[in-house]
Image (spheres, rainbow, N blue to C red):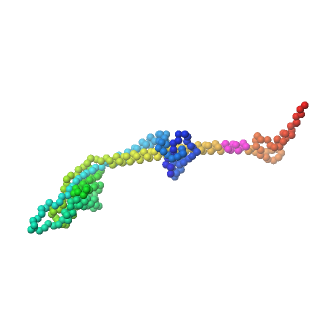
Amino acid sequence: MILAPWRFDAQRLDTTKTTTLFEPLAVPGPVWGGNVDVWSAIVVLVRRFYITVPLAALTLFGAYSLTRDVAPEYHATATMILIGPTAQQPPRDAPPLPVNPFVQLGTATVATTMEIDAQNSQSMQQIQSAGGTTDYKVTNANRSPIIDIQTTSKNPQQALSTADQLVTLVRQNLANRQKPYTADARQQITAQVIASPDLAGPDTKARTRAETIAIGAAIVVTILLVLLIDALIVGARRRRQLALEEDAAARHAASRQQTKHEVRLEPAGGERAIERGRPSEQAREEGTSSRAPIVRS
């Protein structure tokens, strides 16, 4: 399939060749002897400026209309840290404390566990049921006891409230994991907030990205439409010219045929077709015999 069958040639346009802009449409277009290049496309766009300018304005306005309603995004962040048990070791003669396996795993491993718990489907459904957004991240960087929370929403209040909900969810999941082993909070790993949920300014990157994509698509559509319209105009003009040339050639051929072959009736010998302007063999013989010889004295 040839999308734009033009190639610039400064010498002349070869009108003996034809091609199609889109093969399924069978739209004829001019051919300079090769495929399209950037310069030939620019030539077409400039030549059809009365089509390019309004079409570009329409497509760009449509792109702006589609992207102007794209709302900016808001991000809220919070940071938590896991702290080990605060209970004092009992005296030697006192009964031993219950064993908490999560304490033995360490706060870094428990932080990774909280990251997984906060991002499973059950937790997401719980956040969504409370009016929060599911576009959030709970991460544990470099296997440390620090947990980072980041939420994203087009509603700033929703982003901030989701960060609060995640802080509460991490604490609940942490307590529920350790409750079967000990109910004493002093013997459990706890989570403390070291950076309260905070709302950042609006992020316009999403809107800028959408506008860039829309403008690029509008430019491409404009170029393709101008090339298509140019091919249709050139093809229609060529078909009209060829039709006129064929009609003139047919008329000329019919006139010559009628001139060469004219039929007439002879007075004493039936019908015989002769060519106008050429004497018959009998006429030439009679003319020869009727001439008297010239005698020189």
Return the residue found at the far right: 297
73 drawn magenta: no
**Left or right of 256, for residue 133:** left
User: Which residue is drawn at the image coordinates 48% and 42% (left, top)?
Assistant: 39
Which residue is found at the position 21% from the left and 52% from the top?
Answer: 195
Q: Main secondary structure of the magenta part?
A: helix
Expressed as whole percent of the image width and height from the top left, the position of residue 189 reads 18, 61
For this rendering, which residue is in front, 276 or 4? 4
Residue appearing at x 14%, y 60% in the figure? 86
Residue 126 seen anywhere in this rendered image of the structure:
no
Q: Is residue 252 left or right of residue 228?
A: right
Residue 257 among magenta residues: yes
Question: Residue 104: percent from the left, percent from the top?
Answer: 19, 64
| Vertical relation: 179 (above or below) 220 | below
Which residue shows up at 54% across the image and 44% down it? 32
Residue 79: x and y in percent read 22, 53
Q: Is residue 36 visible?
A: yes
Q: 79 or 156: nearer the eye? A: 79
In the picture, the quarter occupied by the C terminus is top right
Residue 11 quadrant: top right
The span shown in magenta is 251-260
